[in-house]
Image (cartoon, rainbow, N blue to C red):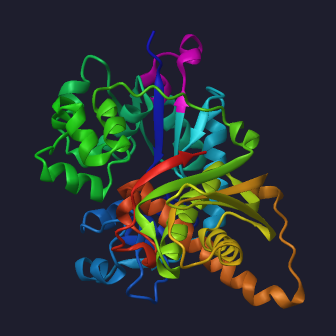
Amino acid sequence: MDRTILHCDLNGFFASVECLGRPELKSVPMAVCGNPKNRHGIILAKNEPAKRYGIKTAETVWQALRKCPDLVLVPPHYEKYSEYSKLVNQIYLRYTDRVEPFGIDESWLDVTGSLRLFGTGRQIADTLRETVKRELGLTISVGVSFNKVFAKLGSDLKKPDATTEITRENFRETVWPLPVSSLLYVGKAATQALVKRGINTIGDLAAADGRIVTDILGKLGEQIRSYALGEENSPVRHYNESADLKSVGNGMTFSRNLVGEADIRAGVIALADTVAHRLRSHGMMCTTVQVQIKDPDFKTISRQKQLQNPTQLAREISEAAIDLIRSSWNMKTPIRLITITGTNLIPQEEAAEQITLFDENRHEKRARTSKLESAMDLIRSKFGRDAVSFGATVNKDIFGTHESDE
């Protein structure tokens, strides 16, 4: 029997939360951005009136102001967003214990075991939309399908405050005509590579020879082709399953050997970025960073370092990893593979930072970094992993395949 999976996506989440506290913003074009005084900042979210001016998430503030000179700019308040995210997930938990957050404003729900109690997948989706709107004043769009990938795609098709059902009977007509970039995990670079080979739509991807797609994108190609065919079947995790995590790590065999500090730093930052993102998505922090290095002759070393404070920030994880490599590796010796792992995890709400009188500047800097990386999470959740990157990793020719994914 097919599962019934929902993907619930809060509409214009940051902007909607800001409008709750300032109702006057609902009727005027407004956007949330990193720093309203910085015209080079990025739009993080916008309300419906701003959308009508063509304002887009991830574009720069100056681009948005050219479209709408009267656009009201509001700074983000991440504590509020986190609070409302938890409240929304608590509503979802009334219908199933299988609620898997995917970033701060999205969650998958497996309601297969709840159908006899609450009705069909569409009925549950409509009930959730009404309940979230009535109790919290926010709206969600919900995709209903037989797997997680198509449920997420469904929630993207109609916004705001809509339910879209993608079934085994209609997915070919509904999904296959869409651009291949609409599919989960198909970012900008993957899209360009596929389009270059004539694979423009999800249907093209489904019909393509699997060997050709694998040649283009490696293991990712095999994975996303199965998505296009409707074969994705990963489970929706229980809501509290992240508490059982012991470690979060990522390893990469680079497309060429890393030589010198610039190469090593770029590789480390890319890996730390992924590890930090996963820690945040699970609501966890690591207290230890572990690094494994493998040279071209497959000689391997492993080192670890206990951190002064728990973290889920890419900048702090990468700094710890680079310190470990500097102290234990000849920086001129080539590196084939690096794996970075955050271990000894604790829930973020239990991570009481030890701040002394001498830490005030560091604490402020850390708060700014946290806001920046949370903003990157939001942009990537909407536009893919390639939408925004750290400067040290841009235009590097070292990135190859992920060998481990813990």
**Residue found at x 65% / y 68%:** 317
Q: Please determine whether, in this image, residue 210 is positioned above or below residue 4.
A: below
Residue 39: which quarter of the image? Answer: bottom left
Please state which of residues 62 and 234 is positioned toward the viewer in this rendering.
Answer: 234
| Residue 173 vertical placement versus 214 (above, below) | above
Nearer to the camera, 30 or 111 = 111
Q: Specify the quadrant that holds the C terminus.
A: top right
Residue found 23% across the figure and 77% down from its top: 67
x, y percent for residue 63: 28, 80
Residue at the farthest front position: 297
Magenta stretch secondary structure, dominant = helix
* Magenta span contains residue 224: no
Q: In the figure, residue 173 lies in which quadrant? A: top left
Percent across and percent down for residue 6 are: 47, 31
- The residue at the point 57 percent across, 53 percent down is 250
In the rendered view of the protein, which quadrant contains the N terminus? top left
In x, y percent, where is residue 345? 77, 53
Position above or below: 76 against 276: below
Query: Whole-percent x and y of residue 129?
Result: 48, 37
Would residue 46 be visible to someone looking at this image?
no
Q: Is residue 394 above or below residue 80?
A: below
